[in-house]
């Protein structure tokens, strides 16, 4: 039973559930209807990202008004583009939990469009090592969301730089924890049957999975990484986007470890959730450039969920991910996530291939 952070966990689960309802509505639309705009770094953002972030911040502000928030998106594009703004507002206004008590816990509806823009801009905290900081990725894997594949709604609470609560809503992963890992690209739109899972973890209290439904939250059940008895049967996950993780180096690492199965490529922190429940075994994220710094919202929830399920998560140098240095993981490089018992073996192979061995 959860003792510490029970309220934070409940609010985070409900906030992610509500945001995922909104993203599911957008997911059903065609690519052009998703209202995609390109950000300064040329990465995409959709009406779903904006709407989900506004709803999550609204729930956090209602419950934890003093906490800092580090969120991926902000409202400037919407202040300029009123058509896009009105589409986002329509989604935010119309998305509610069907459980009235739960909706009340989140503080109910956002009152008007200006409040929505104001909420969207509340995620610009610089983070850091002091105090309580929530980090939000309203849609992680926007490219997967656009191509009809995997994506996640991610929310985590850091306290003094340490992840205490993590929740991942993965609307397109199978509910069934033992379903085989597949790439799930080009999913049948409008048919959510058997899909949608909420992963969660509280520091020191284990990791859980439960169906991501539309009604009252289901009870979570404990999940665990699969004991990896024979490395050659390991299933490893990596990004679909070759620009996010070096796939040719990953193939060399797999070969060095004697892994025979091809990697499973999927977008978003669905990779962390998948290995945490034993559907996959290893997640590698190998830098494609020296200058890119990973963002804390891309990893905080997944990092805790994997560690609480019996895994170890480090960067390619073998250091734990440090969420206390700001909005990015400026002191880390890449990610190596694996069951604790084999993590050092995997890290060894990573370092050999990347030339990091001393
Ligand atoms: N050059 C790069 N290297 C690593 N990650 C990158 C990157 N450019 C963008 N990303 C991040 O990769 C995330 C998606 O990860 P994945 O490849 O595992 O699906 C994106 O999250 P968003 O989709 O939330 O923007 C984005 O933050
Ligand atoms: Mg993005
Ligand atoms: Mg992301
Ligand atoms: Mg995102």
Image: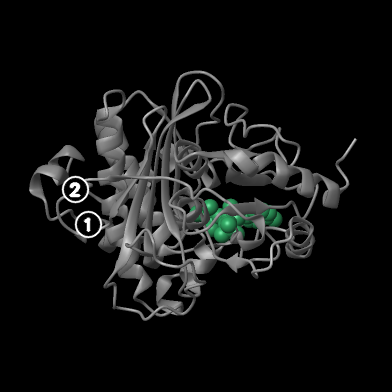
Can residue 82 be seen at all in this image of the molecule?
no
Mark 1 burial class by Cα count in 10 Å: few <14, some 14-19, many 20+: some
**Which mark, by number, is residue 59?**
none
In the picture, the quarter occupied by the C terminus is top right
Mark 2 burial class by Cα count in 10 Å: few <14, some 14-19, many 20+: some
> Disc 2 on helix, strand or loop?
loop
Q: In the shown orientation, is residue 225 left or right of residue 5? A: right
Q: Earlier in the sequence, mark 2 or mark 1?
A: 1
Percent position of residue 229, x then y:
58, 51
Q: In the shown orientation, is residue 107 left or right of residue 119? A: left
Query: Count of labels shown?
Result: 2
Q: Which residue is mark 1?
A: 93
Quadrant in the rendering for residue 322: top right
Judge whether 229 appears above or below 31 on screen. above
Q: Residue at x 67, y 61 (%)?
A: 232
Judge whether 353 appears above or below 24 on screen. above
In the image, 71 versus 182, the foreground residue is 182
Judge whether 263 appears above or below 314 on screen. below
Q: Are marks 2 and 1 in contact (CB under 8 Å)?
A: yes
> Disc 1 on helix, strand or loop?
helix
Percent position of residue 51, x then y:
35, 56
Percent position of residue 148, x then y:
45, 75
In the image, 118 versus 205, the foreground residue is 205
Q: Which residue is mark 2?
A: 109
Q: In the shown orientation, is residue 12 left or right of residue 290? A: left
Q: Residue at x 55, y 30 (%)?
A: 126
Compute the Cα span from label 2 to label 1.
7 Å
Furthest residue toward left: 100
């Amino acid at each position: 039973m959860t003792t510490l952070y029970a309220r934070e966990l409940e609010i985070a689960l409900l906030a992610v559930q509500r945001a995922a309802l909104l993203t599911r509505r957008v997911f059903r639309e065609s690519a052009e209807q998703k209202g995609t705009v390109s950000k300064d770094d040329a990465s995409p953002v959709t009406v779903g990202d904006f709407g989900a972030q506004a709803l999550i911040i609204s729930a956090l502000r209602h419950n934890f008004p003093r906490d800092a928030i580090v969120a991926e998106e902000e409202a400037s594009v919407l202040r300029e583009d009123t058509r896009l703004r009105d589409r986002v507002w329509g989604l935010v206004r119309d998305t509610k939990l069907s459980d009235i008590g739960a909706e009340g816990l989140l503080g109910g509806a956002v009152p008007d469009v200006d409040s929505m823009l104001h909420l969207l801009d509340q995620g610009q905290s610089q983070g850091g090592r002091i105090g309580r900081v929530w980090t939000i990725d309203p849609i992680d894997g926007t490219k997967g969301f656009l191509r009809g594949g995997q994506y996640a709604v991610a929310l985590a609470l850091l306290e003094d730089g340490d992840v205490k609560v993590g929740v991942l809503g993965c609307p397109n992963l199978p509910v069934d924890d033992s379903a085989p890992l597949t790439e799930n690209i080009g999913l049948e739109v409008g048919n959510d049957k058997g899909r949608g899972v909420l992963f969660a973890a509280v520091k020191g209290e284990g990791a859980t999975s439960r169906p991501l439904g539309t009604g009252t939250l289901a009870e979570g059940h404990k999940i665990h990484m699969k004991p990896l008895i024979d490395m050659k049967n390991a299933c490893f996950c990596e990004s679909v986007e070759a620009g996010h993780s070096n796939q040719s180096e990953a193939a060399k690492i797999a070969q060095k470890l004697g892994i025979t199965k091809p990697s499973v490529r999927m977008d978003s922190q669905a990779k962390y959730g998948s290995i945490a429940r034993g559907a996959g075994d290893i997640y590698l994220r190998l830098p494609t450039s020296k200058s890119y710094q990973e963002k804390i919202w891309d990893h905080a929830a997944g990092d805790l969920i994997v560690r609480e399920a019996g895994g170890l998560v480090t960067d390619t140098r073998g250091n734990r991910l440090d969420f206390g240095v700001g909005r990015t993981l400026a002191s880390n490089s890449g990610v190596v996530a694996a069951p604790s018992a084999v993590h050092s073996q995997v890290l060894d192979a990573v370092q050999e291939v990347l030339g990091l061995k001393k």
